[in-house]
Amino acid sequence: MTNSARQALNHDLSMIVGDGYTLVDAIPDAYTHDETLELDPVEPIAVVFPTSSNQVSELIDYANAQSLPLVPRGSGTGLSGGATPVEDGVVCSFEKMNRILSINTFDQTATVEPGVTLDQLEQALIDTPYFYPVYPGEMSASLGGNVATNAGGMRAMKYGVTRHNVLGLEFITGAGVRSRSGGAYVKTSSGYDLTQLIVGSEGTLALVTQVLLRLSPRAHYRTLVLASFGEFEEVAVAVDSISSRGLLPSILEYIEASGLRAMAEHAGINLGVTAEVSSTAAAYLMVELESMNHDDLEWQTNLLIEVLTGNNSTEQYVLDDTQRRGLISARESAFWTVKKLGANVILDTVVPRSKLAELFKGAAVCARESNALLVGTGHVGDGNVHLSLFQPDPIECHATANAIIELAQELGGAVSGEHGIGLAKRGYLLEHEDPARLSLMRSIKSIFDPLNVLNPGKLL
Ligand SMILES: Cc1cc2nc3c(=O)[nH]c(=O)nc-3n(C[C@H](O)[C@H](O)[C@H](O)COP(=O)(O)OP(=O)(O)OC[C@H]3O[C@@H](n4cnc5c(N)ncnc54)[C@H](O)[C@@H]3O)c2cc1C
């Protein structure tokens, strides 16, 4: 782009968002990528920071008039390249639309602008009886990004994922139609559910300018149990027993033995796991229980231990508060640990819970066949595992990832359980998704964004 064209663009964008809310020269590195391991950074021609829905609306009109790609961005913590810029496009950063507009404890709702982070919302709710339960680990992520990726995280088994906790939206489609969907109620039977269509659409249909969230009561007591198992398959069976005995953990995570060692070391925490247990464990379950009532929590904990021992768990550790916080924080940071260790790709495939054991076994075979190292953690309570692949050869790495995704599909699963498709997994989606569903998705895209200005090249 010539210097004068860049200055003209800066002028036009500034007319919409005001001086000081655009970047056209020396774009900081942070805006050239998200956190996806396998993608290269891309420098956009500009970054723009709207502060109101009206400005977003004008930006979309301008993008249509100029055939200018607009790439929405929240906090850039995504793991699929959804916020990766396109070379001839403008990044629309929502970081300055970061006001919490209302908290209504009667309706159990919060209304936020899309740039509000999970951390910011948690702080605002801390003195109320409620919290926002979706917990994708990275608390700097924005609610707009969570909506666009349908973020999941550690508490999904009990509280559901983003789509179960978003009651309504304000959004502006790629065609420039501004609308509101849903409302402060948990049921509606009034036509197509546009809220649910926009959730998970990765910024390809509309830009989200307000989010109406559903809050949940905050439990007073919680405990975390770490249980070791000699075989991966036993973990999957134990998950089924935990559920069928009526326990509904707030966190139910699986961590491969080597993964737990690395995470504990990285976080500098002592979980009290003995050398003997550590040397025989293949994997661990991390189970958090919570309650409003101390005696009830004790009852749940005893039942959990009974279920775990009855399912071949070799040892169970009821962690103290420091260990509990330390392990949850280490699990939150698992991505940074595997990144530091040199992981090349992280998959987040999902399968029915009953197929987890087959996925574990089959994925290990795929990795062995291509000399890749595979380390797993994940939200086993909802059949969603994170598989870190260590295979520096990009062709081998892609082939292994593809084989694992194919296996997940054969087991009745899906390409991505929560990180989204973005740029990184688009090839896998196009290869494995049902062509009829892809065709319907393309038709919907053409209605919402006929000139393909919103996040082109992502998802489809
Ligand atoms: C350490 C770590 C742990 C993580 N753990 C989890 C986890 O357990 N579960 C999980 O689900 N994710 C996890 N993630 C991924 C990430 O946090 C989520 O995908 C999150 O939802 C991204 O939010 P963001 O604000 O960073 O979005 P970005 O990365 O900025 O964008 C994500 C997508 O949303 C679109 N978008 C952003 N804002 C808007 C808007 N206002 N309107 C329309 N589209 C928009 C972007 O175009 C992009 O497609 C983790 C990430 C890290 C780094």
Image (tube, helix red, strand yellow):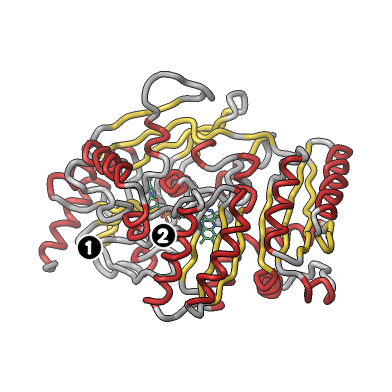
- Tell me the element at label 1: loop
**Residue drawn at point x = 33 percent, y = 51 percent:** 72
* For residue 47, above or below residue 118: below
Mark 1 near ligand 1 (CB under 8 Å)?
A: no
User: Which label number is shown at residue 126?
Assistant: none
Q: Is residue 295 visible?
A: yes
- Where does the image place residue 382, in percent across and percent down from the top left? 60, 47
* Amino acid type at image mark 1: Ile
* For residue 56, above or below residue 104: below
* For residue 195, above or below residue 115: above
**Residue drawn at point x = 38 percent, y = 77 percent:** 394
* For residue 7, above or below residue 123: below
Q: Earlier in the sequence, mark 2 or mark 1?
A: 1
On the rendered structure, is 260 left or right of 310? left
- Where does the image place residue 81, in percent across and percent down from the top left? 38, 60
* Amino acid type at image mark 2: Ser
- Where does the image place residue 435, in percent across and percent down from the top left? 30, 47
Image quadrant where residue 57 sits:
top left
Q: Which residue is mark 2?
A: 80
**Residue drawn at point x = 63 percent, y = 53 percent:** 380
Quarter of the figure with the N terminus: bottom left
**Residue drawn at point x = 79 percent, y = 36 percent:** 292
Nearest to the observer: residue 258 or residue 269:
258
Nearest to the observer: residue 7 or residue 32:
32
On the rendered structure, is 1 left or right of 196? left
Q: CA distance from mark 2 to mark 1?
A: 21 Å
Mark 2 near ligand 1 (CB under 8 Å)?
A: yes
Mark 2 or 1, which is nearer the eye?
A: 2
Q: Which residue is mark 1?
A: 45
- Tell me the element at label 2: loop
